[in-house]
Image: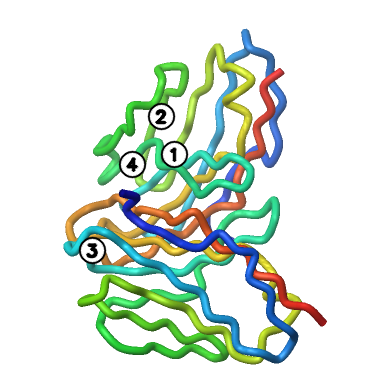
């Protein structure tokens, strides 16, 4: 079983819609959860991180964490064509410097 | 602009060459990482340095040799690479974690082995 699983997509949404990206993880000891955006040929860029159960909002982005279900998601409101990229979910454990990445979900936002 | 700087941006090398990738950060982070990323795959951890000491080696072949001269610099020395080593090499840094510090990536070095 992979440490972190994501649907590879592509996920296609129209401009202005909400994009919902999902991620599950296998290690209940995971403490920190991160979302990165990666444009083709570029390096990953941190979008958000979340440590506590519930929602965390930053502008158009909302991260949701449910530790009981081992599930973390990223909602992108008012999706723009510039949001088209691959979104990587990463998890980490306390006292470890080892980040596990999911395989990424490719998002296409159609004008 | 990224606060983790990698040089060079592109590198083409033959299988008999020796080259080095360089990474520098000035965020005061004491953990530094090398990742390798192939096309359409997630970043794959290679090495982690914590307080300038190698703390994780993910069974990387010895043709890759990391070095951390000080808290701001990280090198990856390359020797006798294979064409399948062609990839995007990413340097990252973070606070020495209690687990809640995100990775900050550099822009990467695109390596092609001929």
Tag 1 subunit: B
Q: CA distance from mark 4 to mark 1?
A: 10 Å
* Callout 1: SS: strand
Residue A110 found in image quarter: bottom right
Q: Which residue is mark 4?
A: B48
Query: Mark 1 against mark 3, which lies toward the viewer?
Result: 3
**Do marks 2 and 4 share a subunit?**
yes
Q: Position of residue B28 (x, y in %)?
A: 37, 59
The numbered mark, 1 or 2, whose residue comes first in the sequence reads 2
* Callout 4: SS: strand
* Residue sitting at x 44%, y 39%: B74
Tell me the crowding category of disc 2: few under 14, some 14 to 19, or many 20 or more residues within 10 angstroms, Cα based.
many
Q: Which mark is residue B74?
A: 1
**Do marks 1 and 3 share a subunit?**
no
Tell me the crowding category of disc 4: few under 14, some 14 to 19, or many 20 or more residues within 10 angstroms, Cα based.
many
- Labels 1 & 2 near each other (Cβ < 8 A): yes
Examine the rendered structure and indicate whether residue B93 appears above or below residue A12. above
The numbered mark, 4 or 1, whose residue comes first in the sequence reads 4
Residue A17 found in image quarter: bottom right
Q: Position of residue B62 (x, y in %)?
A: 40, 17
Q: Which residue is mark 3?
A: A30
Q: In the image, is B46 to the left or to the right of B18? A: left
The quarter in which the C terminus of chain A is drawn is: bottom right
Q: CA distance from mark 2 to mark 4?
A: 9 Å
């Amino acid at each position: 079983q992979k440490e972190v699983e994501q649907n590879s997509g592509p996920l296609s949404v129209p401009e202005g819609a909400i994009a919902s990206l999902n991620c599950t993880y296998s290690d209940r000891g995971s403490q920190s959860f991160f979302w990165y955006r990666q444009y083709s040929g570029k390096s990953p860029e941190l979008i958000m991180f979340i440590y506590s159960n519930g929602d965390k909002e930053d502008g158009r982005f909302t991260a949701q964490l449910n530790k009981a279900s081992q599930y973390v998601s990223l909602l992108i409101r008012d999706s723009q064509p510039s949001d088209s990229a691959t979104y990587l979910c990463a998890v980490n454990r306390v006292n470890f410097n080892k980040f596990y990445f999911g395989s990424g979900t490719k998002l296409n936002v159609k004008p | 602009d990224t606060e983790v700087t990698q040089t060079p941006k592109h590198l083409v090398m033959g299988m008999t060459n020796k080259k080095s990738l360089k990474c520098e950060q000035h965020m005061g982070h004491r953990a530094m990482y090398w990742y390798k990323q192939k096309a359409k795959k997630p970043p794959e951890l290679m090495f982690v340095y914590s307080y300038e000491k190698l703390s994780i080696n993910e069974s990387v072949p010895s043709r890759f040799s990391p070095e951390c001269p000080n808290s701001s610099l990280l090198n990856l020395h390359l020797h006798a690479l294979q064409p399948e080593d062609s990839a995007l090499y990413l340097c990252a840094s973070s606070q020495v974690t209690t687990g809640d510090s995100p990775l900050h990536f550099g822009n990467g070095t695109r390596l092609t082995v001929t």
